[in-house]
Image (spheres, coloured by chain):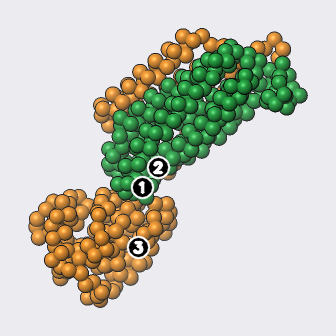
Amino acid sequence: MSEHKMGHIQEFSIYFKVLLALIGLTIATVLVSLVDFGIFNTLVALLVAAIKASLVVLYFMHGKYEDRITWAFIYYPLILLATLVGALFLDYGFRDKGQFTVGPISFDAMHQSHDADSHGATDDHGATTHDSHNADSADTHTDAHGEPSIMDPATEAHAAETPAVDMWEGVHGDVEAGRAKAKVLCIACHLIDGEGNALPGAPPFAETANNTEKTPEFLRTWLKAPQSVKPGTLMPQLPLTDADIENLITYLHTYAE
Amino acid sequence: MSEPGTFFHLHEEDPVEAYENFKLGMWIFLATEVLLFGGLFAAYFIFKFIWPTVFEDGSSHLNKFMGGLNTLVLIFSSFSMAMAVDAAQRGQQKKLVRNLAITLFFALCFIVVKGFEWGPKLSHGITPGSDVFFSVYYMTTGLHLLHVLVGMSFIGLLLARALKGRYHEENFGGVEIGGLYWHLVDIIWIFLFPLLYLI
């Protein structure tokens, strides 16, 4: 140990070249992101970042002059991390995409459950394992408004049994005000009286109004904070007051048959 | 060779051995830091895999210019930190103080740019609860910001000690491990920038 010197003094030119390389690679990663490599976008970005990180570790952190023990502690978190991400992708990669019933995909799942009444909601939402997954995801992302119980198939099934007439009780908004709002906002994605856009995952008003699962209570939470009900949904959080929401629900009710 | 109150004064070991152990301890700590952020990176990849459209949409709300600017700011700060360690190794007091001050200044720039990024987002109602993307965005960049603040206090301490002439050719371990920590903060951002802003 005695002949071993403390640290390693590196030439200035090395630091400077590394700085230039890091700046160059930062510009490169921005430029490369403008080209679409499809599924390889992430891979290319990670590759450039890994090269940059390696330069920092090797030359700025003097990793090049470190001993084996230090390198063991550089590699071991990377191996653990690769194991974690690899295992997660083995899990999620081999799942049926339809299982992720929260998010944009779930919208389709909800339509199916509505169309196929005889099968009941539970079939479409799958076995208990899926439900626990839903609950987990919902818990992770719900805020104060969140009502994960809405996701519960049992509740949905219960709502389906309730006669449609009862559930609209207590909705006393202004139909005209609701119509005005809907024709400005909702029409951008939803079909109203055959007008507007029918974007994927955005059901026409006539369909939602007759969907017994979409109770006024559900719609209030939904309009207030769509993400809290379905993290990842494309439904935007609109700047609506409580009165606006009541009016919209009242207007929507006029489409119920 | 070691002055009262310096790190090596507390140890019985040979100064070179103590220096090596000091550094190894920091490398081991950095390994745990990689795993701390690694969990969040894993969450990022899984959520992006499940909800690609949410991530595409969320990413388009981020300001690429500000993200890129902050990347460069951190790279320059990493460079000045490396220069500070080099100065300490060579026993160049003035250069050490200057480079530590420059590093601190760049760190402050990073926080200011971050403020200009977060401020308008939060006032427009884009919060961690907005969707899965912003949940990951605020968590990763927030934890990173916390590391920037810790790094700044570390560098501030080094600067105060450097002004008292504490570091020289045979005592620069403190500056070097401060540098190691600061470089890790840079490395984390090197990964966060393309993943959140660019793809």
Q: Position of residue B147 (x, y in %)?
A: 58, 41
Residue matched to label 2: B138
Neighbours of disc 3 within 10 Å: few (<14), some (14-19), many (20+) = some
Residue matched to label 3: A150
Give me the residue at 41% from left, 21% from top: A24
Q: Quadrant of the C terminus of chain A?
A: bottom left
Q: Position of residue B51 (x, y in %)?
A: 38, 52
Neighbours of disc 1 within 10 Å: few (<14), some (14-19), many (20+) = some
Q: Quadrant of the N terminus of chain A?
A: top right
Residue A255 makes an appearance in the image: no
Neighbours of disc 2 within 10 Å: few (<14), some (14-19), many (20+) = some
Letter of the chain that mark 2 sits on in the rendering: B
Q: Amino acid at mark 3?
A: Ile
Q: Amino acid at mark 2?
A: Tyr
Residue A37 makes an appearance in the image: yes
Q: Which mark is residue B127?
A: 1
| Residue B33: quarter of image | top right
Q: Position of residue B61 (x, y in %)?
A: 33, 46
| Chain colored orange | A
Going from N to C along the chain, the mark reached first, 2 or 1, is 1
Letter of the chain that mark 3 sits on in the rendering: A
Q: Residue furthest left?
A: A194
Q: How far is mark 2 from mark 1, CA to CA?
A: 8 Å
| Chain colored green | B
